[in-house]
Amino acid sequence: MRALLVRRDILLLMLARLIDMAGSNALWIALGVRVKELTGSDSAAGLTFFAFVLGTLGAPLCGALVDRSRRAPLLIALNLFSMALVLPLLLVHDRHGIWICYAVMVLYGLASGTSGSAMTALTQALIPPERLGDANGLLQTLLQGVRLIAPLLGAGVLSASGLAPLVVGDAVTFALVALLVALIRLRENGPRPSGPEAEGQGAGARLAAGFRHIVGTAALRRFTVATMIAVIAFGFSQSVLFAVVDSGLGRPPAFVGVLGATQAAGAVVAGAGAAVLMRRAGETRTVVFGLVLSAAGFLLTAVPALPAVVPGTVLMGTGLPWIIAGGTTLLQRRTPAHLMGRTDAALGVLIGLPQTVAIAVGAALVALVDYRVMLVLMAVLTSAAALYLATRTARRATGGPHPDPVTTSP
């Protein structure tokens, strides 16, 4: 870990990711709360997140842009665009200006999807393949810490001073990220496609190249299928935790924040160990371990007692960074540079769509079904994802003339 942080360019990249995450998370939470204050409607507040997700559906187009551009200049341009994009939120003073929030969030989602793919591709170009696991593990540790602090900071600033300081602060963070990326000394010649890409393809075929790469690469295909199953459970958890607090523990709704903090604490610790686990077990098995811990966390949280719920949420938080770090490293190691943007964007769509649907379905089911039944269902889904990934990987590694190894780590 220390060897990574002493490298100037990697340190700049890490700082850029942290500042971007801090500014965005603080604003997103506060914007939903502000819409709720202005309209009195939970649905209107929830639409701010839906608008963001709607924007991310342009990810395949964004990925194609990433693969046709030099990543650092593209990131600088995207952050300067986003800096200007959030400023119209300063005009929102009553319910008649809510449409501005939705319009900004749609474009915010589009820009975020593009910059996320560009950051993944830039990380792949900047960090040696054998150190990608270390970098992603360290990044998850830092990002989970930011996720713990930023929403609380955003809510506090909103309560004390209103939305304007958060909007200006988010604009400043975008400017800082653009500056940090500009200071990275990476000479990019631009991605050079090979094979069918070099021979020329139609626009539709080029846009679909990321999806084809996932389907055609056994390790990525298995990871994607398993994650699509698991994110349904994680989507349900957005609503189920409120029922755990209310019906299970008999605590006020604000106690959800306490459980969120225990989740984040588990995530910070897990992120610190992700790199070591990947070196010893490989990326795919790291994802499997994360899924198993999450399933155990769901089961513990179904017990209506604080001594069970707290460790349950810690396990839920512990599992997620292993899934993300393992999957990100696997993606970067199994994807050529000229496809990185489109493949990352395709993965985002394949995982994001079922998760979004699950959030909506979970909000409806929690009013109709006992939350403990839902938590057991979530544990079953996550366990099924782990079992599928573990057995398919083991079968591929032991049978067939050309096994697809669990990891490419040296």
Image (cartoon, rainbow, N blue to C red):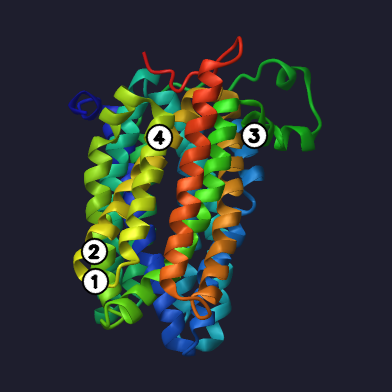
Residue drawn at point x = 56 percent, y = 69 percent: 360
Kindly identify the amino acid type of the residue bearing the numbered disc 2.
Ala
Kindly identify the amino acid type of the residue bearing the numbered disc 1.
Ala
Q: Earlier in the sequence, mark 1 or mark 4?
A: 1
Q: How far, Cα to Cα, is label 1 from label 3?
A: 45 Å
Q: Nearer the viewer, mark 3 or mark 2?
A: 2
**Residue 301 x/y as whole percent:** 32, 64
Which residue in the rendered view is the most extreme toward the top?
401
- Disc number placed over residue 273 in the picture, else none: none
Residue drawn at point x = 36 percent, y = 18 percent: 130
Q: How far, Cα to Cα, is label 4 from label 3?
A: 19 Å
Q: Earlier in the sequence, mark 4 or mark 3?
A: 3
Q: Label 1, on which residue?
A: 305
State yes or no: discs 3 and 2 in contact (Cβ < 8 Å).
no
State yes or no: discs 4 and 3 in contact (Cβ < 8 Å).
no
State yes or no: discs 1 and 4 in contact (Cβ < 8 Å).
no
**Residue 125 x/y as whole percent:** 44, 24
**Residue 202 x/y as whole percent:** 81, 31
Q: Label 2, on which residue?
A: 308
Q: Quadrant of residue 1?
A: top left
State yes or no: discs 1 and 2 in contact (Cβ < 8 Å).
yes
Q: Nearer the viewer, residue 355 or 49?
A: 355
**Residue 52 x/y as whole percent:** 54, 62
Q: How far, Cα to Cα, is label 3 from label 2?
A: 42 Å
For label 2, the crowd category at 10 Å Cα-Cα, with few meaning under 14, some 14 to 19 and many 20 or more, is some
Kindly identify the amino acid type of the residue bearing the numbered disc 4.
Gly
Kindly identify the amino acid type of the residue bearing the numbered disc 3.
Gly
- Disc number placed over residue 326 in the picture, else none: 4
